[in-house]
Image: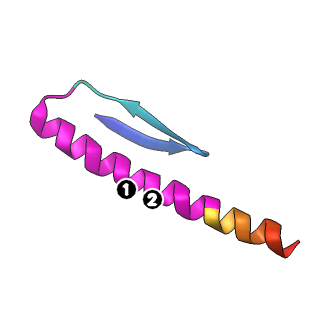
Amino acid sequence: MKVALDGNRIVVSAIVGLKDARRLLKRLEANIALLEDEEKDSGDEEAAN
């Protein structure tokens, strides 16, 4: 299983069973949170300019 951020995208490569699907879900949720934080930060910068 490979989960990585590439700019503003999450890149996933995996073949998973149930146990690994749960791990994948947790990794996706963590990466989504990172992307949301980046989006908020870039929005704050745009509002300041």
Q: Quadrant of the N terminus?
A: top left
Q: Position of residue 38 (x, y in %)?
A: 60, 61
Q: Does residue 28 show up magenta in the picture?
A: yes
- Residue at left 45%, top 59%? 33
Q: Quadrant of the C terminus?
A: bottom right
Quadrant in which residue 19 is drawn: top left
Determine which residue is flagged by label 2: 33
- Magenta range: 16-39
Gap in Å between the C-alphas at discs 2 and 1?
5 Å
Is there CB contact under 8 Å for labels 2 and 1? Answer: yes
Q: Position of residue 31 (x, y in %)?
A: 43, 52
> Helix, strand, or loop for circle 2?
helix
Q: Amino acid at mark 2?
A: Ala
Label placed on residue 30: 1
> Helix, strand, or loop for circle 1?
helix
Main secondary structure along the magenta-highlighted residues: helix
